[in-house]
Image (cartoon, helix red, strand yellow):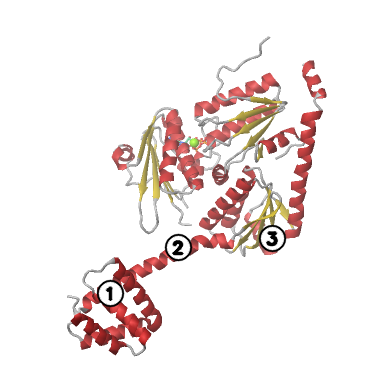
Amino acid sequence: MLHKKVDENLDIDRVFDSPAEDFDVFIRIAREEDIAVARQMAKQLAQEAGFSLADVTKIATAVSELARNIYRYAKQGRIMIKKLLDDREGPYLEIIASDNGPGIAEIDLVMTRGYTTYERSLGIGLSGVKRLMDTFAIYSEVGRGTVVITGKRRRKF
Amino acid sequence: MKKLISKARVVPVICLGDFLLVPIQIDLDDRTVGLLQQQVLEEIESTRARAVILDVRMVDVIDSYISYTISETAAMARLMGCRTVLCGIQPPVALTLAQMGVMLQDIAVARDLEHALLIAGSQSGVG
Amino acid sequence: MNSNGAVNRVEEMVQELAADSRLQGLWRNFLTAALADNKEKKQVEQLKDSLSLLFEEIGEQAFTAGLRAMAAKNPSLPVTDLLCTVIQVCGEIRRENEQTINNLRQMLPELATPIIRIWTDMLLVALIGNLDSHWAQNIAERLLDRVSAARAKVVLVDVTGVPMIDTAVGGFLIEMFSAIRFLGTDVILTGIKPEVAHTLVKLGVDFRMVTIARDLEDALRKGIAIVTGEKKKRRQLAWVMTGDKESESGEEIDI
Ligand SMILES: Nc1ncnc2c1ncn2[C@@H]1O[C@H](COP(=O)(O)OP(=O)(O)OP(=O)(O)O)[C@@H](O)[C@H]1O
Ligand SMILES: [Mg+2]
């Protein structure tokens, strides 16, 4: 699975200004405590959607990584989660993390395991999210912000 | 004379002979993780413990920042002559850590408290 | 409308459609339910049952031939309505079958991958077949829950029944093994065939975090050694913690 890069059609500002009512979970990340709140709400939503406990934990962990990146590198942003229903395939959770922060110059670089610009960290956040989830896309523009869209489908068996 | 007492006690630390037992029952947000590290290191210094056992049975999410802090604490503890044993990782957390490719360096893992004491007490470095 | 006339008409058709009394019964059930104006739950069930049985007994071809003959003889028969009903029922039967298949699929990994308590504190899992991502995750989740509930000290993983281990499967296995290690449980791996070993080395998949055993017997021996070794250490620890405190406290006074 390749991570998608800059998409001409995606407007970072529009994603950032998405209305809250379009989502099941909508959390502004501005303080450190918000990370734990986002994690907890994601967990609850995934649980209600019937994901296995392991997958619930993976989703909560992914949200934790994305929320922390927002807090650390962009100071503030949003975590938005939507439950999509599909008769044939079963429920699907989509997580959008968006910020109007500094943006990322080299996507390939930050997606590399172990790459970090932060002093006290492993640099496995984004690559970890990609591994934990089924789909992963990242869009970023320097000076405008970053959007990560990632999703996980409930396993049938 | 009183020994240094940590300014912020975020967890109750139990002294078991040469060992320190740290049951982590709070939701680990970032600030708490940092305070926890500070407190554990101070307690190691004041009690001169040989090993510290971090009991994470109640922790339901361990992300990269938390695992980094745990590894870092263990590395610092090692420099103070103290071994770190992590015990009670829940199956969903274990699966998540494994899928993220996290490796806990300088740390031994134990099934439960008894096993943790066993590892903490044994002379040879158990992985 | 379901008057005596309609009943008689059904009876006439039934006589022409089949000679065998069993088949006549099936046709009768089918036609009365299909031609009823207000289909209640009971009649829908009857329709489904008789239709499935008819398909089973005479096949779709003979069934459609029967319908055709009926329509030719009785121009007043609402053939379109009848066909619509049949299609609907077929759809429902198909959905039920899909559900059954899904349920069976759910059970398959369970049946194919039993987890056995082979010794005190030791579990054995024999992986069989080609592991795909969903399967592997399902097995990993079940195995971890078992290991945790049983407080197993050792898990023996036998991959004799896995015909091919590519990077993807190797990746699943590594993930599963390191997850088991996070629980504080040892993994002993056995059953890697020479050709599999060859590909593994070429792909750069090494299983450093596990003990490798030649065969199941060797694995069992190594497992028992771990279990008993821990028991011994446990006794020593109890002895140290209760009996031999003086030297330690003496040290403390020094400092
Ligand atoms: N929202 C963002 N805005 C700007 N830069 C970001 C953002 N998210 C990540 N980055 C950059 O990408 C790098 C890699 O991020 P990643 O989450 O993978 O690792 P990390 O945050 O450095 O460490 P870890 O997540 O393991 O604690 C970061 O160091 C940072 O430079
Ligand atoms: Mg990060």
Label 1 Cα neighbours within 10 Å, binned few <14 / some 14-19 / many ≥20: many
Q: Residue at x 47, y 52 (%)?
A: A1
Q: Residue at x 76, y 52 (%)?
A: C222
Under 8 Å from ligand 1: the CB of mark 1?
Answer: no
Label 3 SS: loop
Amino acid residing under circle 2: Asn
Badge 1 or badge 2: first in the primary sequence: 1
- Chain under callout 2: C
Evaluate whether label 1 is on the same chain as label 2. yes
Q: Nearer the viewer, residue C109 or B64?
A: C109
Amino acid residing under circle 3: Gly
Q: Which residue is mark 1?
A: C33
Q: CA distance from mark 1 to mark 2?
A: 30 Å
Nearest-to-viewer mark from 1 and 3 = 1
Evaluate whether label 1 is on the same chain as label 3. yes
Nearest-to-viewer mark from 1 and 2 = 1
> Quick check: A15 left or right of B8?
left
